[in-house]
Every structure is written in C-alpha cells, then in structure tokens.
C-alpha cells in the first residue's frame, strides 16, 4: 500500500505519545540551545574557540561510540533505551543551574555536560530512528518523520524567542532547567508507549562486536545511494558545525543584538524548517521521493551565503533570508533522507546502519566546530560563515551523481523494502 493511502499516523495512540514527548523535549532543547552558548559568552567570557570546543564536546560521542552503540541496539528493545537516554540527559542538565546557584559553574563543567548529554543523545538518536518503524510501520515513515520534524521546527520557532526573553529575565543558567524538565517529561511519555517490538533473534546477532559493526558499515558503503547520502550529510553537518561556532558571536558582537533579539531572529528563520516539514510529503510526491533529496539542497544551498552579508539595521534581512533558506533545504533533505534509509534497510541491521550514518554525519562535527572556532579567531566570524556556506554547496553535487536516474525510493531497492 502506498504511503498516501495509509491511515493517518495521528490515529496511532503510540505515535501521539511519541509526538507529545518530543514536543516538550524539542521546545526545551531550543530554549536551552540558545541559553548554553549565551551563558558561556556572557557569564564565562567565552571566545570563539571556547564555543567551538563546546560544540565539539556535544557531538564527539558519535565518532567515539556510535558504531558499537548501533550494534548493541540491534540486540535489545529500543523503547527502554530511549526512556533511559532522556532520564540521563535530564539529570546531567540539572547540574548546570545547581552549580550556577552556588557560584561553582565553569567552562569545564559546561564541556562535561555537553559531552555526557552527547553520549545519551547517541543512544537516543540511533534508537529513535530504528524505533519509529515499529511504532507506525514502514509504510508511514515519511508521514511520521514529517510530523516529528514539524514538531521540532515548531520548537525552533517558539523556543529561541522564548529562550532569549527568559535569558534576559531569569539568566541563562536558570533557563537550562527548562530543558532538564522537558527531558524528564519525555521519558515518562515514552514509557507509556505500548507498541511491541519484534523479539530479537540471538543467532542473527551472534559473533564478535567488530563483525556485527562491520555488517552495518558494509551495507552503507556497498549501497551507492546510502554511501552518497552519508557523504552529503557529512558535508552539510561539517558546514553547520563551522558556522555554529561563530553564529552567536556574529549576532551578538558584530550585529550588536541583545539576547532577546538573537532568540527572535533564530525563531523567525526557523519558520523555514516548519514550512519544510509541512511541505515535504507534497514535494516528495511531485518531484519524487528520491529526487527531492538532492533538489532540496541544490536550490537552497547558495542562498545560505547571504548570512555573511548581514549588518545592523536593514542588513538583518540577509541573515533572515539566508537562515530561512538553509533551514528549509536542510529539513526537506533530512526528512526524505531518513525516510529513504528506513524504507530500504532491513530491520535486523537498521540500528547499525543508522549508527554508521550517524558516525559519518556527526563524526566531522567536532572537527568542524574546532575549525570554525580557529577560523573565527584567525580570519573573523564573517569570513568563517562564508567558508561554511561554500562547504554545503558540494553536498547536492554528490547526491545528484547517485540519484540522477531515480525518481522514487521504490526504484532504488524494491526488494529490501519488504525484507
């Protein structure tokens, strides 16, 4: 049955629970996402390199443990892992406001918090992408991913603006408490999901860890489309990491924006993400569920360079347009890319394939964050944003080579969809 003829994902109680949990989590994540770097800049006098290291610490876990985490997740039920991951993040983030209240907060603690929450995120992200087909079925993953991304982008709209206002009123450290609470709420909500996962066959996952990890890596490397999406995603994330190291500095110091204005600007630009999540199913049907993967980046990528032209006053329009286009293209790409992978990959190795993709995608993020911080110190934040924009332009070229002959996902690996 085609996805367009499937019953709505919102009729599923389990999906509604999953969506509710992620709604609270994403709102909290976006609120504290602006609070942590602002806390580092304003309270701890962080430099561009400090922010680059903070970004690296939050993502280095993907490179360090992503592959074995995927092999382990293929051997266990994924639902309880998601609950535990949210609970751990809630507890770790709670230490930030506590340390602040007692005057003990330091850059070292922020780096440790970023590192530990990053470890929990590895297990959550790999497990979540492998768990969604269990909750709603493979035939509805595009609709499910679109709905989840709509929630995430809605949080991007409300979160940064609310976060910037709350930082101005309450202080950045206190705002981090909001994310700790939302992770706890998400853990409770996920715990209520009743979907039964298929029993794990021990014989299918026997053998040394390195051999099981290698099976997932070989599947990605051996599949031309997955290989291309891994390379393109790595380039896109490298670009984002370079830019993220200097974006807050650019907005606060170069454009002289207060915290509330930074939050509002990021919220307005995130409308592109919300629009993308709503339009993705329509675009996929009209352009093709495989073709849209590269078209999205090819159309919007060049517009991201406009951010570097930003200046106080009317020059902020360049920043808004550039961020809007970048969010729109990246979200359409992310939804269609993940949905493609979930539909063509056999379930028995889905977690390992997701982990392999996660390592490929996030493995360069720590390097990109450090590079962005170093470039910010050496050539300035504006030039660093230009470098990030040039990197992302390579991604659609890689995807075009692999997908130019295919319009829809079913043309790529029709047999593996039903395995």
Image (tube, rainbow, N blue to C red):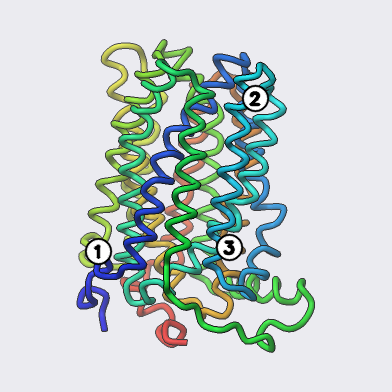
Image quadrant in which you'd find residue 65: bottom right
Marks 3 and 2 sit apart, C-alpha to C-alpha, by: 28 Å
Q: Which mark is residue 287?
A: 1
The reply to whether residue 309 is visible in this rendering is no
Q: Nearer the viewer, residue 257 or 186?
A: 186
Marks 2 and 1 sit apart, C-alpha to C-alpha, by: 51 Å
**Residue 174, placed above or below residue 229:** above
The disc, 3 or 2, on the residue closer to the chain's N-terminal end is 3
Instruction: Please give the name of the residue rendered at 45% of the width and 13% of the height, measured from the top-left corner.
Output: 254
Q: Are discs 3 and 2 less than 8 Å apart at CB?
A: no
Image quadrant in which you'd find residue 261: top left
Q: Secondary structure at mark 2?
A: helix
Instruction: Please give the name of the residue rendered at 77% of the width and 71% of the height, measured from the top-left corner.
Output: 210
Q: Nearer the viewer, mark 3 or mark 2?
A: 2
Q: Are discs 2 and 1 less than 8 Å apart at CB?
A: no
Task: Tell me residue 250's x, y (percent).
Answer: 47, 19
**Residue 176, placed above or below residue 347:** above
Task: Tell me residue 280's x, y (percent).
Answer: 27, 57
The residue where tag 2 is placed is 99
Q: Secondary structure at mark 1?
A: helix
């Amino acid at each position: 049955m085609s996805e367009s003829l499937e019953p709505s994902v919102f009729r599923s109680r389990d999906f509604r629970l999953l969506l509710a949990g992620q709604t609270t989590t994403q709102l909290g994540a976006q609120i504290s996402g602006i609070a942590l770097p602002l806390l580092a800049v304003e309270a701890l006098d962080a430099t561009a390199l400090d922010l680059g290291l903070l970004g690296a610490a939050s993502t280095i876990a993907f490179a360090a443990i992503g592959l074995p985490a995927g092999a382990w997740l293929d051997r266990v039920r994924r639902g309880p892992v998601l609950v535990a991951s949210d609970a751990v993040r809630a507890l770790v983030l709670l230490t930030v406001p506590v340390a602040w209240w007692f005057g003990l907060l330091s850059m070292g603690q922020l780096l440790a918090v970023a590192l530990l929450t990053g470890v929990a995120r590895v297990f959550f992200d790999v497990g979540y992408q492998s768990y969604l087909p269990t909750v709603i079925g493979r035939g509805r993953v595009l609709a499910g991913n679109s709905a989840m991304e709509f929630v995430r982008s809605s949080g991007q709209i409300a979160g940064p603006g609310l976060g910037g206002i709350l930082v101005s009123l309450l202080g950045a450290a206190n705002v981090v408490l909001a994310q700790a609470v939302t992770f706890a709420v998400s853990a409770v909500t996920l715990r209520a999901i009743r979907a039964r996962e298929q029993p794990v066959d021990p014989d299918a996952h026997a053998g040394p860890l390195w051999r099981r990890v290698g099976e997932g890596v070989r599947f990605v490397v051996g599949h031309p489309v997955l290989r291309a999406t891994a390379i393109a995603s790595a380039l896109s994330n490298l670009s984002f990491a370079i830019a993220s190291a200097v974006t807050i500095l650019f907005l606060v110091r170069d454009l002289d924006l207060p915290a509330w204005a930074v939050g509002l600007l990021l919220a307005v630009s995130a409308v592109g993400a919300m629009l993308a999540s709503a339009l993705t199913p329509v675009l996929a049907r009209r352009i093709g569920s495989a073709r849209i993967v590269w078209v999205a980046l090819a159309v919007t990528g060049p517009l991201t360079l406009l951010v570097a032209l930003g200046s106080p006053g009317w020059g902020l329009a360049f920043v808004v347009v550039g961020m809007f286009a970048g969010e729109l293209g990246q979200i359409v790409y992310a939804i269609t890319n993940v949905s493609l992978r979930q539909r063509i990959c056999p379930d028995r190795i889905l977690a390992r394939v997701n982990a392999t993709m996660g390592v490929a995608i996030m493995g360069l993020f720590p390097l990109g964050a450090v590079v962005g911080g170093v470039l910010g110190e050496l050539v300035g934040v504006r030039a660093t944003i230009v470098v990030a924009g040039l990197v992302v332009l390579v991604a659609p070229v890689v995807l075009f080579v692999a997908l130019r002959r295919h319009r829809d996902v079913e043309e790529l690996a029709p047999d593996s969809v039903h395995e």
